[in-house]
Amino acid sequence: MADQMVLARIVNMRGVDLRRFEFDYDLTWAGFFFASDGTILGRFGGRDGPSPDKYLTLPGLKHAMKSAIDRNGRPAGKPMETALSETADKIRHVEDYPASRRLKANACIHCHQVYDFRRDYARSKNTFTREQIWVYPLPENLGFSIDPNQQNRITSVKADSPAAKAGLKAADELIFIDREHIASFADIQHALHVAPNEGSIRFTWMRNGKRNEAEVDLPARWRETDISWRESMWNLEPSASVYGKDLTEAEKKSLGLKATQVAFRQGDYVPPAAASAGIRKGDIILGIKGKELEMNMLQFNVYVRLNYKPGEKVVYEFLRGGKRQEAAVTLPKKTF
């Protein structure tokens, strides 16, 4: 099928139209299918937290490609939908964000920096909200899972979930979510990304040759999921000011720690906020005093960012030479 397409690769976000190339900018790879007039025929890619390549399957790609080719072959009189949403801040190119000026002239702008620069801009305008953290929700957030090899096919529906209450069942094949044609996991995520924060969204699917439609209700906080894998997570504030390599289960056991509790060895660079509080390279960070946190190092960094504000003082517990100690760290505020 590739011989029916013109292949192109973009490796730098400079000059890229953010309306047309709207995708999850934390991904290491994302694909689009375009008609010759610029109409978006489909997307491919996407991931969940645990697995970066679960949905990057060859059968899944073939299914998405065939769908794009079929849509491109629509007869005259049936125009294709081009759903280009204006960016919330009206900025069309990443180099137009003021934060991009921190880079050297003509330096490569990475995909994840779109999120970084966009959020910095929103903070500078006092328009940043917590909801902006949650991008490209998973289908599981609404209670359904899909087949990695045919990514419009539902494999399971969780009981009493919004999807179940709307009537969706395993083996249903999605056609549309709202007005977005569905052939891939990336199509689903994009449709959910542009959905409202509350209310409902229309699903259209096939079951036993019959077309079905229903509104799927969007519950409170339905967008939220684990963001610890995201590169753009590090740009959220406040910084935890600690990071490092997670201890193995054996290392935790030797120190008398629970296998599931947060425990990581502070890396070579100690950020100023932690260093001034007394934390050193190699200290074993055990989390926050008075809290039993069962998570890894990345999830701990997310926890601090989502539960504290810049300027707050947090007491970290850590081990040094086998002795438990404490450090009161004032969480830093970014400067622009």
Image (tube, rainbow, N blue to C red):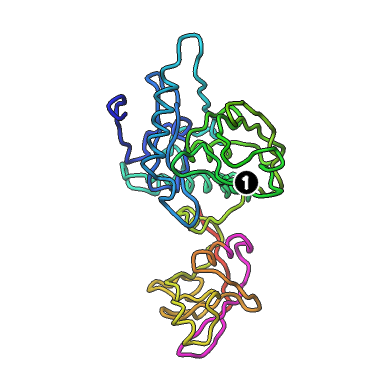
x and y percent of residue 38 in the render?
41, 22
Q: Which residue is at a point 49% across and 64% down the rendered structure image? A: 298
The image position of residue 105, as x and y in percent, is 32, 43
Residue 321 sits inside the magenta stretch = yes
Direction top: furthest residue: 77
Q: Quadrant of residue 172?
A: top right
Residue 169 location, quadrant: top right
The secondary structure type at the circle numbered 1 is strand
The disc labelled 1 sits on which kind of residue? Val
Q: Quadrant of residue 294?
A: bottom right
Q: Residue at x 65, y 37 (%)?
A: 196
When the figure is inspected, residue 63 is found, relative to residue 256, above or below; the finding is: above
For the point 51% across and 56% down, the residue is 335
Residue at left offset 45%, top offset 11%: 75
Query: Residue 48 placed where, x, y %?
Result: 50, 51
The residue labelled by disc 1 is 157
137 is higher (above) or lower (below) than 20: below
